[in-house]
Amino acid sequence: QSPKYPFLRQQGLLPARKLPNALLIGVKKGGTRALLEFIRLHPDVRAAGSEVHFFDRHYAKGYDWYRQNMPPTLEGQITMEKTPSYFVMREVPQRVYQMNPAMKLLVVVRDPVTRAISDYTQVVSKNVSLPKFEDLAFRNGSQFGLVDTTWIPIKIGVYIRHLERWLKYFPLKQIHFVSGERLIVDPAAEISNVQEFLGLKVIISEKHFYFNTTKGFPCLKKSEGQSSHHCLGKTKGRSHPLIDNEVIERLREFYRPFNARFYQVTGVNFGWP
Ligand code: A3P
């Protein structure tokens, strides 16, 4: 970048790397990639492409390292990154607060039962010898045993627990919740709310999306800065293993009170079965 024009830099007329002012903190398998790809179509948003993991894995490297991992932005543009593990890692809320108490936080949530199955599907795709879902979801490997709340794919879905930790540092109005289910059936509506939350002019709308019947998901149309229409990669929208209905029902029962509390605290009924 040009050191020749310090004046232009000072005026914000040359792009410079800045620490993020918005974070997509989770949840894993909620639809975080889709949300990031959709919101970064906005001309006033610049986002890091890959997960930076600053607040959990690379915190000791310091703010300068973090800034170097951000894309250059112009004055007035929002800098953001997504790292879904932030939502569940204990040390993260305080660290984010310390860096920027005005940070805007985005969370995509999805029915925790489907989320757990999606999480498992991802793990099993890398390790085919993994036991069956139901053997891991319940203690003693039996669906008649208690739900194994220490198994990470189950634990992540107790959203209220994680949210409570964030609420010790951030007021609810600084956290925007996106429904992972609605992001699939009506991406324009969800993205419109996200743009409003971020204080952006609503530019991303229906005309940016089309429903790809082969993939079974909304994809992006060809647009400015987008050479052709495109869908998310193969690892997004995988088919899930068939899980016994009784197992699903037991997990639904387990999550019900946590979901109810989550709806109450967020003021949003996500309508999970
Ligand atoms: P599945 O692969 O289980 O269907 P994340 O990006 O947080 O890992 O979330 C992945 C999930 O995003 C996918 O889970 C899929 O259901 C969901 N998703 C939402 N919108 C999507 C889209 N437009 N294309 C592909 N997947 C999408």
Image (cartoon, grey):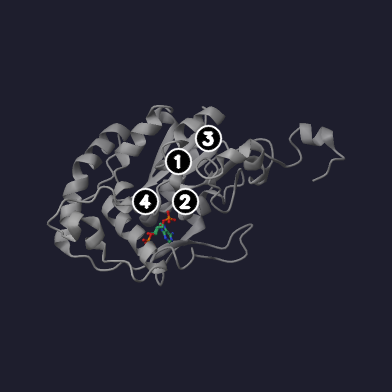
Q: Earlier in the sequence, mark 2 or mark 3?
A: 2
Distance, label 2 to label 3, CA atoms, is 17 Å
Q: Are marks 4 and 1 in contact (CB under 8 Å)?
A: no
Ligand 1 has an atom within 8 Å of the beta carbon of the residue at disc 3:
no
Q: Is residue 62 left or right of residue 198?
A: right
Residue 6: x percent and y percent? Answer: 83, 35
Disc 4: CA contacts within 10 A as few (<14), some (14-19) or many (>=20): many
In the image, residue 239 sits, relative to residue 141, either above or below, namely: below
Q: Earlier in the sequence, mark 2 or mark 4?
A: 2
Residue designated by label 2: 35
Residue drawn where x is 46% and y is 68% of the image: 234
Q: Are marks 1 and 2 in contact (CB under 8 Å)?
A: yes
Q: Earlier in the sequence, mark 1 or mark 2?
A: 2
Query: Mark on residue 199?
Result: 3
Query: Mark on residue 180?
Result: 4
Disc 3 secondary structure class: loop
Distance, label 1 to label 2, CA atoms, is 10 Å
Q: Quadrant of residue 93?
A: top left
Ligand 1 has an atom within 8 Å of the beta carbon of the residue at disc 2:
yes
